[in-house]
Image (tube, rainbow, N blue to C red):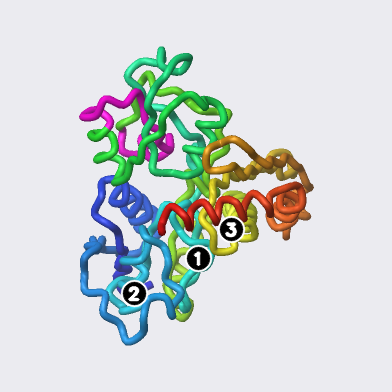
Amino acid sequence: MSKVIRIGTRDSELALWQATTVQNQLEAIGHSTALVPVKSDGDLKLDMPLYELGITGIFTKTLDVALLKGDIDIAVHSMKDVPTQLPKGITAAAVLQRAVSEDILVHKGTDFLNDKGTLATGSLRRKAQWLAKYPHHTVVDLRGNVNSRLIKLIENDWNGAIFAKAGLERIKLLPKDAVVLDWMVPAPAQGAMLVVALEKNTEVLEALAPLNHAQTAIATQIEREFLRTLEGGCTAPIGALAEIKDQKVYFKGCLHALDGSAAVTIAKERPLAQHKGFGKSCAYEVLENGGKQLLEEIKNELNNSVH
């Protein structure tokens, strides 16, 4: 490709690491690139309201707008932050090989696990799964980028906080004593990176094709299909993980009540050659086994907490 590929990125340390990773891979196969940091509070004035373009993701909105305006050629995202429905005109160009998918506990000593304690997380999924295992704990809200969340943990009298292991590993901030939560089902597509571009930009799509990791693309597609089928416009504590081994896909998924008091879980396997529709069929099974009622309760609870 003759022209420089402009890579849009948010300016957090993790976002820059991800964008640089894509930049290095593109340059290794002969493309010229430039990083374009995009500020969240940029000029978002468009001819059309964001909702009409189908732009919903809180973490991806700014880059989607920059793409549609032609300020950048591609955007790099943590795939778990990307809404399952991409905005009109934007398409998935490459899914990079997944890093680790687990959640981890960063803590100030693990004595609190068997006692009373306060845990911090901004994720409904992490909160629900934590309370299912540790109902005697208090869970407080924690938001911000990885660096600011780590600082908040230090500054507050909380016992611990939950992070994606991949994020802390990437920016070399993983504490040696962090506990891997191997019992927690991760967010759909956790640990994977997605590169998006405009559907009509065939030159850029061709340039990115070699970066796509087929097995990661299949696994994350199954997880996101599970999420999308269950969600139906409702944010809920949903976990999903598809792993491919020996030409088989092993899937586990879960839907929890907000307070962790109830859950519908599923674990299935299927030949890799028959992976199409696997996420959807697992979601339907969850819905039939009590998930539909649980989602209604979650929706009502979330609506009541807003009003």
Q: Which of 290 and 3 is in front in this view?
A: 290
Where in the figure is residue 293, as x and y percent of width and height? 68, 52
The residue drawn where x is 25% and y is 62% is: 40
Q: Which amino acid does label 3 sit on?
A: Glu
Are discs 2 and 3 less than 8 Å apart at CB? no
Where in the figure is residue 284, as x and y percent of width and height? 73, 55
Query: Which quadrant, please, contains the C terminus?
Result: bottom left
Label of residue 92 in the image: 1
Where in the figure is residue 106, as x and y percent of width and height? 37, 26
Number of the front mark, 2 or 1: 1
The residue drawn where x is 41% and y is 16% is: 112
Q: Which of marks 2 and 3 is nearer the N terminus?
A: 2
Q: Residues within 10 Å of mark 3 (few under 14, many from 20)?
A: some
Q: Is residue 169 above or below residue 271?
A: above
Q: How crowded is mark 1: few (under 14 residues within 10 Å), some or many (20 or more)?
A: some
Where in the figure is residue 282, as x and y percent of width and height? 72, 51
Q: Earlier in the sequence, mark 2 or mark 1?
A: 2
Q: Mark 3 points at which residue?
A: 231
Q: Is residue 4 above or below residue 224?
A: below
Q: Name the residue under label 2.
A: 2
- Write down the region rendered in magenta: 153-172
Q: In this view, does 122 lie above or below 72?
A: above
131 within the magenta span? no
Marks 2 and 1, how far apart in space? Answer: 22 Å
The residue drawn where x is 41% and y is 33% is: 139
Q: Which amino acid does label 2 sit on?
A: Ser
The residue drawn where x is 53% and y is 49% is: 189
